[in-house]
Image (cartoon, rainbow, N blue to C red):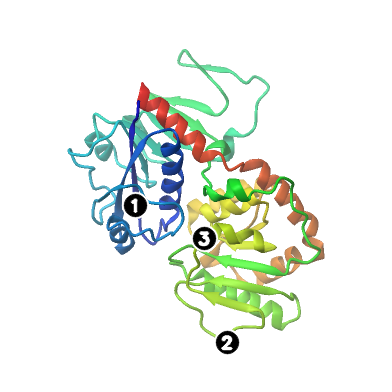
Amino acid sequence: MTHRLILRIHIDPTLGLGHLARALAIHEEWKALGGQVTLAVSGDERARQVGRGINILQTSGLPNQIIDLGEDSLAPLGKGIQGEVVLFDQWTSSREQIKEAAPLKIALMEDDGDAYEESDLLFQPYLEGIVWPDHPIRMKEGVKLKPHEDIRGKCHVLCGASYIVASPIVRTLRPKRQPDQPLNAQKILVTFGGSDASGLAQKAFNILKNLQQEGRWRGSAVILAPRGIQGDLFPGCTVHASVTQLSEKIPQYDVLWCAGGVTLIDALCLGVPVVAWGQNERQVQGLTELGQHGACFGLGEGPSADSRTVEDALEHWLGPEGQESRQEQVVAGMSLIDGLGATRVAKELWKLAEK
């Protein structure tokens, strides 16, 4: 029996395109199970493009059925939409929005509000679920739960890195062994998302230019800057507004400098060390968790970061003194992210559809 999944996402400068990338990864896995997908999208002009069937990520294909819900992230799905399960992936779904989706079965992705009270399933792909305790089974409200599980009222909660969704291509590109880090990291890829609303590409460019001019780093950088770069490029620096198939290009570089999002996840899965700026408080929290597990080098919140402090930190991390740290990050990152998150999410949604 086939099932139809509705993927409800929102695109704006704050959320970027990561939720679209995650939706397309889940879409591929749902199709592999024999299901059909409807993509319901709201947001800025990029959402209008997706609504017209334009694949602005130019990665895996869009679903055949796409519904443009306009600009409002809280816009209802509408009564005519067909399906058994809807996954809301937009951080801030409302209880009213969830109620209006009845009688569909409701799942949420990475949602911190109170919408779970009206939902059946909540994915919280954070890191608190990765440590297996001494007693792996616990009881809560008469229900047996594994470490990555919880219940909140009627809502079943699945936590941990196992549900972090990477791009489909990284499973093919993932090396069979952990790559060795060079003594000096010389090839850097810099990207802060499809919109870079905070202008972090310019800030990163200025920092790398200063490091090179002061003789504190020698290397090359490809910087993806959708808003462009002001100033003369330093030797070895190339700037693009965007590139296609970004995840496929990550292994060509020694390190990645990015924000929190799907690109970071893909790099960890591929064994490429990451230095990261958070674009907001939520991303900073996620980067802190990754740093505590040794998986990335977090530099705090990018817009407020002190450039000189970042220069000093990068000089050490990119050079011979940072080789051991970068290698440890490769090991930790590949251990955390195995590339199967979308598969696990799709299977759990399929179970929900069959209830």
Image coordinates for residue 48, horizontal then vertical, percent:
28, 60
The quadrant of the rendering that contains the C terminus is top left
Q: Which mark is residue 10?
A: 1
Q: Name the residue under label 3.
A: 245
For the residues labelled 1 and 2, the Cα–Cα distance comes to 36 Å
Q: Looking at the image, which residue is at 65% across and 68% down? A: 188
Dot 2 lies on which element?
A: loop
The quadrant of the rendering that contains the N terminus is top left
For the residues labelled 1 and 3, the Cα–Cα distance comes to 22 Å
Most extreme residue toward the top, as rendered? 142
Could you tell me if the residues under marks 3 and 2 are in contact, i.e. CB atoms within 8 Å?
no
Dot 1 lies on which element?
A: strand
In this rendering, position of residue 126 left or right of residue 94: right
Give the amino acid at mark 1.
His
Give the amino acid at mark 3.
Gln
Q: Looking at the image, which residue is at 42% across and 37% down? A: 30
Image coordinates for residue 274, horizontal then vertical, percent:
64, 57
Residue 110 visible in image: no
